[in-house]
Amino acid sequence: MAKTNFTDTQQEAIVQAIHKAEQNTSGEIRVHIDQKCSGDPVKRAIQVFHKLGMQKTALRNGVLIYLALNDRKLAIIGDEGINKVIPEHFWEDERDLMISYFKNGQFTEGLVKGIYMVGEQLEAFFPIAKDDQNELTNEISFGEDGE
């Protein structure tokens, strides 16, 4: 089970990073962790994105960071509001940074650093609004095995 790979303290650090990263943007960030992903991680991330209802934000500006631990697969996907304004391969720096931590077994640190970078990028395109509300939970979602 993916959740058992992270202590309560590590999970809280990830949730706090999401909270802090969202303080300057109307964008919404979620993290989903599977134990395994036998197929394409982007396709699995899209499935999870919809399962979590991330497409229901007002500005369609949700970002999902998807990680499959055993298979060492990572995907970062944004909703259509984001994809309309960012260039192709936009999330490569964030992905590469996270992978550099993951290679050393530092999954929590990699996720936290990546979340902060995603938040900074979202702030440039989706700055915080005066009436902003947190539309999605900051909690990590965990799965068993990705398809």
Image (cartoon, rainbow, N blue to C red):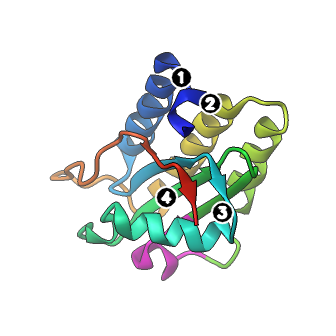
Give the extent of the magenta segment: 77-86
| Residue visible at 43% across and 79% down in the picture | 80
Identify residue for label 2.
Answer: 108
Q: Is residue 85 above or below residue 49?
A: below
Q: Name the foreground residue: 140 vs 18.
A: 140
Residue type, numbered disc 2? Thr
2 or 1: tag closer to the N-terminus: 1
Identify residue for label 4.
Answer: 64
Q: x and y percent of residue 74 in the render?
A: 68, 56
Pointers 1 and 4 in contact (CB under 8 A)? no
Pointers 2 and 1 in contact (CB under 8 A)? yes
Separation of marks 2 and 3 at Cα, in angstroms? 19 Å
Residue extending furthest top?
Answer: 9
Where, quadrant-wise, is the C terminus in this rendering? bottom right
Density class for disc 1 (Cα within 10 Å; few <14, some 14-19, many ≥20) is some
Identify residue for label 1.
Answer: 10
